[in-house]
Amino acid sequence: MKTIDVNVTSVYQTVSADQIKALDAEAAKCLETVDKATGPGNDFLGWVTLPTDTPESLLDEIQQTAAKLQKSCEYVVCIGIGGSYLGAKAVIEALSDSFAAYKNADGNPKVLFAGQNIGEDYMWELMDLLNDKKFGIIVISKSGTTTEPAIAFRLLKEMLERKVGKKDAAELIVAITDAKKGALRQLATEEGYKTFVIADNVGGRYSVLSPVGLLPIAVAGYDIKALVKGAADMEALTVAPGEQNPAQLYAQTRNALYRAGKKIEILANYCPKLHYFGEWWKQLYGETEGKDGKAIFPASVDLTTDLHSMGQWIQDGERTVFETVLTLAKQDHEVIVPTDNDNLDGLNFLAGKRIDEVNKMAELGTRIAHVDGGVPNIVITIPALTEEYIGQLIYFFEKACGISGYMLGVNPFNQPGVEAYKKNMFALLAKPGYEKETEAMHQRLAQK
């Protein structure tokens, strides 16, 4: 079985192989804590066996629901925020034609996203696009009351019902929500929406391999069974402790770097289709580890593009940074640099070479320069951008994140800091039940 590969040898100028190996026992114990669900947050570890626990019948049901939306819709709007949209967005972008939006449709509806922001122009422009189009809705929310997706759903539900009538609209709305409770569950039951369940033991940022991510990915026309199979293969590879476990190796290497003063991790890709994978990864690691005054700060760059903006800082800035490089072994297409008789651009030395060869040499040259400049590199090689390898990569990062969080000494599966902005926002908007907070906020603002 071919898998993604993790290589940490380019960190040895900063932390030695022996320093990483010295964390073997600690990392193995944290791996066991994840797998046996014995640590803080253990009630949110359903994702650990999700790839192998997901029944074939559920995948069939998701595909059937996707086929129904594909048949009826030109566009399907996926409403959700955080993990409720980033995973699906990352996978769809990685597997899609980069210019699909400008080409003739391939027979599948375009998957659009809403509820991930409170942008008024964004919503107006989305609704303007959908005004004369056939569209459906996938709404994802455990409670149904999270502000951003709730606003988007209220608007788009009303729009859809006005276009096709309440009865037909109900056939075009799928709710992914709690099994028994919450506003969205109640509404779905009353209106007769097709529903899928967000399991109580799977948190949002670990939910891409559940119906939360699988349904939008299936609507976009991708093979969710291959995606889950890839994740299941990686699940099997990350059970036994030791250096052959790629998730453990990555987790203990990045923690060794953190303890050596490397406080910022940059996820660097050399494939434009992986931009949103970086966005998904940032939420996964930022929300999992960033608490109790600890954690590596997760950032991401698209290279070589960002070498012309962030490259200077990475090469010569404060030496608190390391890179995790996603490198793609195989492209789907081949483009050769032509010869030009005048050679005014001086590029004839590249004539006859594939663009990917140029990109690979830019990558290798950059990695060498960054390591020489004091930026250690972890290199993760992806054999190709397929559903199976993306599934492997998702599970690899999820498992490593759980291990790494426990190595940091935090609860990897809560997010207490996320609530702070909400309390202030609700006070400023005078939400019922926040009267005291509203008065206190007004007094605070009046003093400025």
Image (spheres, rainbow, N blue to C red):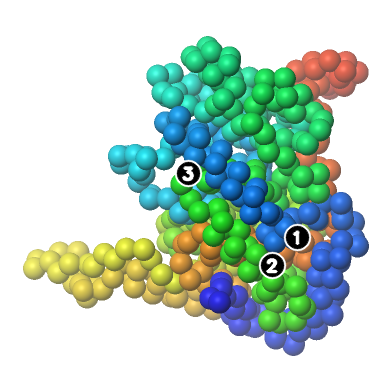
Sequence order check, earlier mark of 2 and 3 = 3
Residue 102 appears left or right of 271? left
Q: Nearer the viewer, residue 191 or 5?
A: 191
Q: For mark 3, what is the residue?
A: 220
Give the numbered dot on residue 18.
none
Residue plotted at (70% across, 52% down):
206
Q: Which image quarter is the C terminus in?
A: top right
Q: For mark 1, what is the residue?
A: 48
The three-letter code of the residue at mark 3 reads Ala
Q: Which image quarter is the N terminus in?
A: bottom right
Q: CA distance from mark 1 to mark 2?
A: 8 Å
Q: In the rendered view, would you say 40 is above or below 136?
A: below
Residue 407 shows in the view = no
Q: Could you say where residue 172 lies in the image, as x and y percent from the top left?
A: 55, 26
Give the numbered dot on residue 235.
2
Q: Could you say where residue 331 lies in the image, as x and y percent from the top left?
A: 38, 66
Residue plotted at (44% across, 34% down):
71
